[in-house]
Image (cartoon, grey):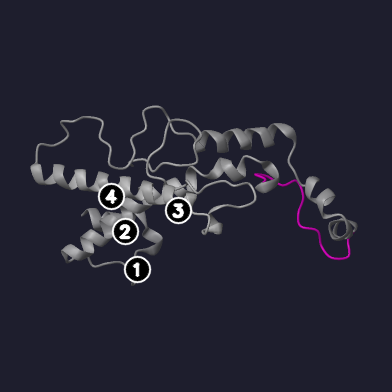
Amino acid sequence: CWWKELREVGHSDKKEEPWWPKMQTCDELIESCTTIIYIASAHHAAINYGQYSTGGFVPNRPTLSRRFMPEEGTPEYEELRTNPDKAFLKTFAPQLPTLLGMATVEILSRHPTDELYLGQRDTAEWTTDADILQASEDFKKNLEAIEAKIEKMNKDERLKNRFGPAKIPYTLLYPSSEPGLTNKGVPTS
């Protein structure tokens, strides 16, 4: 029933697509659950928590535009061709909508103080099953190894793609984070 609802109600526009798993084997269930967990955690974190580092500076990613793309042969097109910076600045929205867009992106990019990250639980009594507790502990150790690998790669000068001119290390899918605007962390979803 869950799978039928997911396909036919949640994705009614795609319910006839041939790529849907039939959900008749354990492997299909594992693959589908893995995809859902990935989208709700790491994929969401990659899209959400890195927004402010680039989108908080309006010229990098304006939230609104006051002008259409100019058509060839118009004075606006000539200005774009001859003075693209001036033409670009004219497309920015007024101050209040711009500030509201920046504030929204900042709020979306912040972690609250009570955020739980992958591998964390809010109570020690969440289960008493020894196998599940061991699997959870193994998962936490894997996440710690991922964090250590990211840190090691960020320090490796041979990996020049890790640093641009601003020398900003890659942190976006670093599994844990502190509260606030950190540009890292994958919350449990």
- How would you classify the magenta stretch by its main secondary structure? loop
**Of labels 2 and 4, the one closer to you:** 4
Q: Are marks 1 and 2 in contact (CB under 8 Å)?
A: no
Query: In whole angstroms, how far apart are the C-alphas of marks 2 and 4?
Result: 36 Å
Dot 2, crowdedness within 10 Å: few (<14), some or many (≥20)?
A: few
Going from N to C along the chain, the mark reached first, 1 or 3, is 1
Left or right of 181: which side holds 176? left
* Residue, disc 1: 16
Going from N to C along the chain, the mark reached first, 3 or 4, is 4
**Of labels 1 and 3, the one closer to you:** 3
Residue 189 horizontal/vertical position (percent): 33, 42
Q: Residue furthest top?
A: 113
Query: In whole angstroms, how far apart are the C-alphas of marks 1 and 2?
Result: 9 Å
The picture quadrant where one finds residue 160 is: bottom right
Residue 131 horizontal/vertical position (percent): 10, 46
Magenta residue check for 3: no
* Residue, disc 4: 142
What's the residue at 17%, 66% (across, down)?
Answer: 24
Left or right of 14: which side holds 169? right
| Start-end of magenta stretch | 62-74
